[in-house]
Image (cartoon, rainbow, N blue to C red):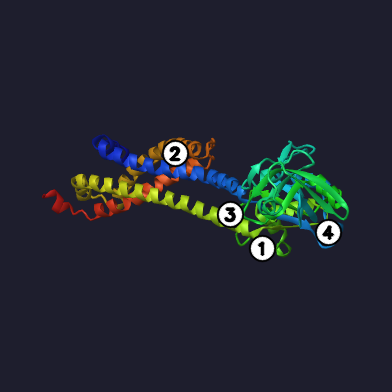
Amino acid sequence: MLLRILKNSFLKRPRSILLVFLSITMGAAVATAFLGIVGEISHKMALELRSYGANILLEPSALEGGGFLREEDLPKIKTVFWKYNITGFTPYLFGVAELSAGTRHERGIVTGTWFYKQLEVAGEEASFQGVKVIAPWWELQGEFPLGPDEAVVGAAMARRLGVGLGSELSASVRGVSHRFRTVGIVTTGGYEEEQLFAPLVTVQSLLQKPGKVSRVLVSALTVPMDDFGRKEPATMSKDEYEKWYCTAYVTSVAKNVEEVMAGSRAKPIWQIASAEGALLKKLNGVVLFLTLLALGASAIAVSTSLMASMAERSPEIALMKAVGADRLQITAIFLGEILIISLAGGIVGYLLGDQLASFMSHTVFNSAIKSPLWLFPTALVSAFLVAIAGSIAPLRRAFLIEPVRVLKG
């Protein structure tokens, strides 16, 4: 009997059914699209934020290794548990030298580093590491050094020494000197403008520190920090430590790196890590809010369509009440209709949302996206919730219909 009533309802009111179906479908499609790209947005934004600087500082632990790290240990960074989250790193060796160019002389900082070095790690794919990878925000006039006698000079130092592209200058440390040709001038608005940057091996020779590194900056993709991520590992239980270690917090990635670098101490650069985490949280919050807003708008559209339909069906409902139908039976009829529509709308909405997510990802990030499997049941649940929320007001109106008044006109 119920199935016959549902069948007649669909056949007699195709326009109303279509409006409800479209409302539910659009809600499910938008929810699927937004939730489908939320992970992609977080990943892409994290990659974009990596261009603003490293978020992990690796430095020597107290007095171990003579206050230096070993360059030979650096490839181990790409062998840690979170190696695929580490997008780049570069070592630095600092020293004070007597700099001269023509008739101008001054004491300044000489920094040895990797600019764009191909790193070979056994069992792993070759990768490029260096300043060009972790600091793409450098404004470089000229080019990065390719040879051992080439250097990049900070803009402030270049003005004081009166050097430009192609100029020669020399650096001397305790009787050891080296001549450099300026191939680049860097502007950052920071302390880099007060330094001379040269290949690491050259500065190691100049400072008589072969194979030594002062510190390493590491850039890694991480998840936003929460209270658990800030918890001190020493106070964690075994299960808590395993969960923390296997979550890409900036603290756990730093711990990974510290474990493979002998005599090192790794710590997050909180100024960058905290800002990234806060931004990603807000971004995810905005996407979830828009998803709820879209579902709410769909529920209102469903409610409006059903209220209009309910006005047309008042005589039918009054007649059912007159022959003895109670609230439960009336609810079963209308919920049966709406659940069938929501099932169809959820399936179609998932298919449309999947295509919409792919289009948005390609348009905004110029990359393809693969929807996770959990999106299909999410689309069905979204459609069901929209249908139920939109049915509450129409059902209450149906319960208030008085058979005598309606049937007598």
First reached walking from the N terminus: tag 2 or tag 4? 4
Q: Secondary structure at mark 1?
A: loop
First reached walking from the N terminus: tag 2 or tag 3? 3
Query: Which amino acid lies under the numbered mark 2 shown in the image of this protein?
Result: Gly
Front of the two marks 3 and 1: 3
Quadrant showing the N terminus: top left
Between 236 and 384, which is closer to the camera in this rendering?
236
Cβ atoms at labels 2 and 4 below 8 Å apart: no
Circle 1 is placed at which residue position? 231
Q: CA distance from mark 2 to mark 3?
A: 28 Å
Cβ atoms at labels 1 and 4 below 8 Å apart: no
Q: CA distance from mark 1 to mark 4?
A: 29 Å
Name the residue rendered at 78%, 44% in the picture: 180
Categorize mark 3 by other alpha carbons within 10 Å: few (<14), some (14-19), many (20+): many
Q: In the displayed structure, would residue 236 be above or below residue 99?
A: below
Circle 4 is placed at which residue position? 67
Between 238 and 2, which is closer to the camera in this rendering?
238
Front of the two marks 1 and 4: 4
Label total for image: 4
Q: CA distance from mark 3 to mark 1?
A: 19 Å
Snapshot quadrant of residue 268:
bottom right
> What number is the disc on residue 353?
2
Name the residue rendered at 82%, 63% in the picture: 62
